[in-house]
Amino acid sequence: MRHLSLLVIIAGFALIVLIPVDQDANGHPLTFTATTLTLSANDSFQVDLQYDLDALALGVSITTDDAVLVNTLEQLSTSDFNNALDRLKRLFERRVRVRFDGTPVPFSVDFPDHGTPRATGAVIPTVLGLTARLTGTIPEGAQTVEFFASRAFAEVHLTIIDETRDIEHQMILEQGARSTPFQLVGQNANSNNNSQAQQYFWLGVRHIIPDGLDHILFVLGLFLFSLKLRPLVIQVTAFTVAHALTLTAAMLGTLNISPQLVEPLIAVSIAYVAIENILTDRLTLWRPIVVFAFGLLHGLGFAGSLAALDLPNQEQLVSLVMFNAGIEVGQLAVIAGATAILGWSRHKSWYRARVIIPASAVIAMIGIVWAIERAYGL
């Protein structure tokens, strides 16, 4: 009865207070500014950069309700709208650079979706659409090309298409980072595989630290339960194997479950593990099985972020291996950090009452709140 009362208090407190947290309701805030740089055979280049242009034109957050953005833009006078459009073009001219041999090259800016069904007839209607197109001329004799977008944009998933040599090369740029030079002659882009592998590895690490707060809380829940190494190893191994399975299956297209279902269940898994930490201090056979099942869910969450990159088939294997390796390193870093902070106290008589139960109660409340937010789109 005492345990049941505790659960009711936790759930009720979470529902009433609705803990304010920065974590995106979808649970995986890793988003990309998808950018395609096409080098044409006629010595011209075109950059298609995907972004919420309505929000950018109004100078507001991209999290602003789309209907509000559309209504605001439609209420502008013709003069004010044209001024907003001009400011948006100048913003791209100031904050984006296409460099050939290290020298920025001028480009023109337009928004090809504006006024077309791709914008007005989209599932989420927009005024300007989502594509900013930058076009310019490749300097004669250019040897390399680089791309840069300022920190005003999210991480950039850059695809370079060299039509003359039929080469496609992808890279991930952190916010405000400049791409490595892409060779226009001589070296084949595929020689950069090591660099790409490193990018996917660090992408996996960042998906845990600092971007994966939900996964951090789940791993901390496992850590808090396990006063000895063996129970922790059993649970982390079950979790790792499970999410590796579903991550691979989802990326290979053999498993497809809606994020609208997966994300609330991931939040439920966080709350469940934390609540069980409060209710028992013994590792039963049931616990690793439950952790394995929740690992399957977390793997689908990881896959959602990696799938957003739309990787070509030849890059999926290396991306899967390195991304998963980065996730494991991130999880180990969380455990190492928790051990460094709490390791000295884990065998104290008061550890359960003063650390495990209070910390698990907080994690449980956060998990319950996230489950509600994600289920109802709050």
Image (tube, helix red, strand yellow):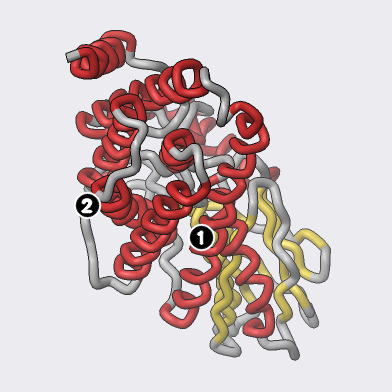
Please indicate, yes or no, whether residue 259 appears anywhere in the rendered image: no
Q: Position of residue 2 (x, y in %)?
A: 22, 13
**Residue appearing at x 47%, y 34% in the figure:** 224
**Pick the front one: 285 or 361:** 285
Q: Position of residue 73 (x, y in %)?
A: 38, 28
**Pick the front one: 63 or 259:** 259
Image quarter where the C terminus lies is top left
What residue is disc 1 on?
48
Question: Residue pushed farthest front?
Answer: 349
Report whether 28 appears left or right of 118.
right
Report whether 2 appears left or right of 48.
left
**Vertical relation: 107 (above or below) 5:** below
**Pick the front one: 141 or 348:** 348
**Vertical relation: 288 (above or below) 27:** below
**Residue appearing at x 53%, y 57% in the figure:** 328
Residue 100 placement: quadrant: bottom right
Instruction: Check disc 2: other Cα within 10 Å, few if <14, some if 14-19, many if 20+.
Output: few
Earlier-in-chain disc, 1 versus 2: 1
Q: Amino acid at mark 1?
A: Asp
What residue is disc 2 on?
258
Image quarter where the N terminus lies is top left
**Pick the front one: 216 or 116:** 216
Which of discs 1 and 2 lies nearer the camera? The answer is 2
Q: Position of residue 96 (x, y in %)?
A: 66, 50
Q: Position of residue 147 (x, y in %)?
A: 68, 61
